Image (cartoon, rainbow, N blue to C red):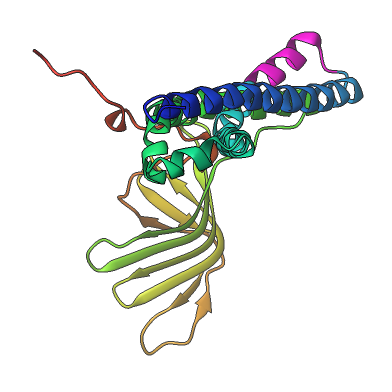
Amino acid sequence: MPPSILPRSILREVLKMYGAGLALLLALQFADTLSSTLGKAIAYRATASESATAFLAILPTIFNRALVLSVPFAILLGLSRLQRDSELKAAFAAGIRPLSLVWPLLLPFTLVGALAFWNAGTVVPAGLDRWDKTWYSIFNVPEKIPTRDNYTYAPPGALYYAGRVTQAPQGQPAPLAGVMVQRGGVVYTANSGSWNTAAQSWTLDAPWVTAPGERPRQQAGPVTLPQGDTLRPPPAEAKRSAMPRSALPSRGKA
């Protein structure tokens, strides 16, 4: 085989194996996901619409996984076929460097990588969010309430800490757990409390108060302290976080 034809032969062989690997991995995952979805849907008496929504929501994840895993599958099988037919030996004997055989594969697999990157950053997170919400509905359980752990706020002369802040419905105080507030030289600690965003205050339930030169004492009732920070929603799970728009390519004005 002429040296100029060999790179095209490698590209054709590897792309053929990539198509076969992609089809195989999609079929295997499709069958496994379909069977598990139907099994759970029957066990929990899900409707046809709920079952279809759950199945379609996970398809972008299956597709992305197959896109990536098919690359080493195609390269290994494609090059092994050429090695078995002694085409690689002939190429090396003709003085073709091994690196020269790799360049033809860069363009198609760069496109595959770009497609997988876009899919993982835009379509997959939305699908996983629908997947979770659909199964919460099928299992008839409430959705997981967003929480923020190890919250810390340090304005001048004070320190606010909560081991966990639980997101509350709009207009309602957010529950706090494991609270510690230091204002000046006085330290307040409590097992629980609440964050009133409208009044910009924390209310500690029967806190212990420690002041300089005094023994710690526990208050009989709640203590309200001013807190000027903004309660922000906790960050979404990494697998359900879409790619920020600033990371996507944009067209500039001509």
In the displayed structure image, the side of residue 33 where residue 104 appears, left or right: left
- Is 53 contained in the magenta span? yes
The spot of residue 102 in percent (x, y) is 41, 38
Main SS of the magenta segment? helix
Q: Which of 109 and 10 is in front in this view?
A: 10
Up-down relation of residue 205 to residue 16 (above or below): below
Counting the numbered discs, the total is 0
Up-down relation of residue 194 to residue 6 (above or below): below
Q: Nearer the viewer, residue 85 or 141?
A: 85
At horizontal 79% and vertical 23% (from top left) the residue drawn is: 31
At horizontal 44% and vertical 29% (from top left) the residue drawn is: 6
Residue 57 is at least partly visible in this image: yes
The spot of residue 59 in percent (x, y) is 64, 22
Image quarter where the C terminus lies is top left
In magenta, the rendered stretch is 46-57
At horizontal 43% and vertical 63% (from top left) the residue drawn is: 161
